[in-house]
Amino acid sequence: MKLFSSIGAYILMMKGMFTKPENFKMYWKELMHQSVEIGMGSLWIVTVISVFMGAVSAVQTAYQLVSPVIQKETIAQVVRDTVILEFAPTLVCIVLAGVVGSKIAGELGNMRVSEQIDALEIMGINTKSYLVAPKILGALITIPLLVILAMALGIYGGRLAGSLGGILPTETYDRGLLRDFIPKNVWFALVKAYTFAFIISSVSCFYGYNVKGGALEIGRASTTAVITSCVVILFADYILAFFLL
């Protein structure tokens, strides 16, 4: 029953974002603020993870492809498809669930506990649309851009590891990148990026917005938001792969 109650409360929160619109200028300012917070605040961790993700993928692929029959360009192909299809959208979004999701849940939870949300509602402001909607829209804008950046950096990380480790020359790696490329993979990765961005932001907003208690409950809400987001992301990853691939 608690699961169905939570799902119902989540749907009501999402519905509340589209009622009683406020001043557009106020919304635009908050949207830009959240976009900068989510995007720039996660840029460094996405950069580091993406480069090493591609580098490790290249090294391990070269370790497994020991047959002389298999061409060296295959290493670049495997790194490219692995990074685009799975590593960049899924792994990066799981990391962002911890970075962005905990921040969103903690911020809203602190506002709920300190009664700032209650004060805004007394002033006649629709807090769901003013506090929740800009965070979700900001995530939908910035997280797919971070995933695109992760794709590029992951592929470059594999190229760098192959060159520095003597695994394969950069010319061979570049030829492998262009070989048998399927544009649908990029489209599929972007579909996953937008889906995961919505999951991270909406689930974190739900748990943060509905905190009851004190500082201890804020920490629990942040942890629950991250765990729930990761589980839902993995489930959605399977569903999208099953129906779209």
Image (cartoon, grey):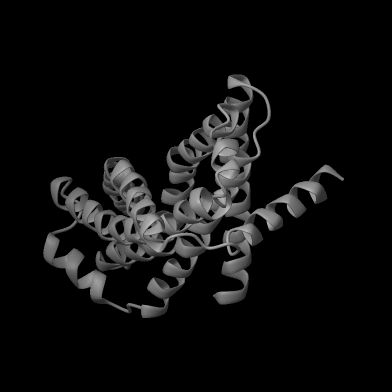
Q: Residue 69 appears at what percent x and percent y? A: 32, 68
Asked whether residue 230 appears in the rendered view, the answer is no
User: Which quarter of the picture shows residue 70?
Assistant: bottom left
For residue 96, side relative to residue 235 (left or right): left
* Image quadrant in which the C terminus is located: bottom right
User: Which quarter of the picture shows residue 113?
Assistant: top right
What residue is shown at x 14% (from left), y 52% (from top)?
163
* Image quadrant in which the N terminus is located: top right
Q: Residue 177 appears at what percent x and percent y? A: 25, 70
* Up/down of 9 relative to 173, above or below: above
What residue is shown at x 64% (from left), y 33% (from top)?
211
Q: Residue 120 appears at what percent x and percent y? A: 54, 42
What residue is shown at x 29% (from left), y 54% (from top)?
154
Return the residue nearer the eye: 141 or 126.
126
Disc tally is 0
* Up/down of 191 relative to 13, above or below: below
Return the residue nearer the eye: 214 or 60.
214
Asked whether residue 6 appears in the rendered view, the answer is yes
* Up/down of 184 relative to 73, above or below: below
Q: Residue 55 appears at what percent x and percent y? A: 27, 48
* Up/down of 182 relative to 195, above or below: below
Return the residue nearer the eye: 80 or 94.
94
